[in-house]
Amino acid sequence: MLEVTAWALPGRSGMLRPDRMSQEHLQTDRPPSSAVARPVEDSAEVRRIAEVIGRGGHFALDLEFVSQSRYVPELCLVQVAWGERDDPEVAALDALAVDLAPVYELVEDTAVEVVLHSAQGDLALLGHRFGVTARRVFDTQIAAGFLGLGDQLGYAALVQAMTGIELDKGHQFTDWCRRPLSDEQLRYALDDVRYLPAIARDLGARLAAIGRLEWVEAESAAIAAAAVERTPPEEMFRRLGGWHRLPDRSRAALRALAAWREREALLRNKPPRWLLKDDALVEIARRLPASLAELRRIPQVPDAAARRHGRDLLAAAAEGAAAAPPEAGRRPSRLPSRMRSWGSDLLAVIHERCRGADIAPRFVASRADADALVEWWADGGAVGAPEPNLPLLAGWRRELAGVAALTWLAERSASAPAERAPARPAPADPGRD
């Protein structure tokens, strides 16, 4: 559980205003240029820092990496902050010069809380490149979204709102792989963790005061788990437009072609489209060429790709076409004409509940969730079919907006008696008076 303090400021609707942290909570300002330490390149120092962090039980983490021309970004610098939340120790660890395994182990330690801002990208990099899965995360961007401070609020904006400090944004597009790093670059990088410990503590206090700290911890854990998931190569074909409309043999061929491209992209660490674009894969699967000459006659296949990968593409397509095809998938539901606008209408109802609670709607439900709920209602939900397995209908989301969504469906059906399906009683809404 995040360490929290007891202070809180009342705001509208019982929420807490996004006032800046008081100076008694945060006195730290940027150090002068001469005080910027050089990146840590010594294994013994990395181990020492990791040991101190482990004893303290919490630290802030941020990564600097280069993603241009790479499928999985290259990690260049790891910044950490630990110790006193109002005046933490900070360090930049050179990921190009030293093994940072002791720090990665902390990320997987359930006894150590790791604080990040907008954690998904950083955690995905650690997971995909180093096999690291975070076990106890507090994401300050998520926390801000649960307090009405803004949806997907940027780190600099959060720091300014909470501390009054305006961060330098001049090095957002730095080539972090280039050495040596300047004092200005290092200051920028260290500022990305310098204020996180105190901000996390104070956001936690606000969340605890309104009973939402566990919500944020659960959502942070879900983001951490999702970040390390990677679509298996054999399932990448489902991301290609029009795959479900192909004949059986072509669908099977496309599955093999997309899997080949994914493995090659990971091996070379190059974006898949650099090897061959989506439309080229789909067209190869459609035509199933039997020779290099036939492959070269496909307009979507560049000559260079045919020369470099032609034989591999032919082999993958032939092997795939001989296998059992994947199912074409569930066809889109055909809603009655009167219900075709219900998805957007229902989403508006959900968003209104979110606005009333000062919580970012994206944490509660998506348009796809609203559409799925309408389809279920049309397919039998109105007469008591089992509820779909949607996050909107479970836990705090159900209390916040799920019951209201079900009630709206029942009331909307009842308002059109000539066309409605038999309606069941609307569920009680614990959020209504």
Image (spheres, grey):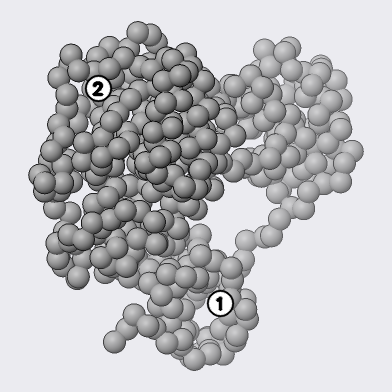
Q: Work out how far the residue at label 1 is from the one at label 2, CA to CA, in angstroms.
A: 55 Å
Marks 1 and 2: CB-CB under 8 Å?
no
Residue at 72%, 34% (x, y): give it. Answer: 259
Q: Position of residue 121 (x, y in %)?
A: 45, 37
Q: Who is closer to the viewer here, 414 or 196?
A: 196
Q: Who is closer to the viewer here, 121 or 76?
A: 76
Q: Position of residue 212 (x, y in %)?
A: 34, 64
Residue type indicated by callout 1: Trp
Q: Please tell me which of labels 1 and 2 falls first in the chain.
A: 2
Q: Secondary structure at mark 2?
A: helix
Quadrant for the N terminus in the image: bottom left
Disc 1 or disc 2, which is closer to the eye? Answer: 2
Against 110, residue 299 (above or below) is above
The residue under label 2 is 187
Residue type indicated by callout 2: Arg
Outermost residue toward the right? Answer: 322
Asked if one can make out residue 13 in the rendered structure from this viewpoint, the answer is yes
Against 96, residue 208 (above or below) is below
Outermost residue toward the top? Answer: 180
Residue at 74%, 17% (x, y): give it. Answer: 309
The residue under label 1 is 377
For residue 59, which quarter of the picture?
top left
Quadrant for the C terminus in the image: bottom left
Asked if one can make out residue 118 in the rendered structure from this viewpoint, the answer is no
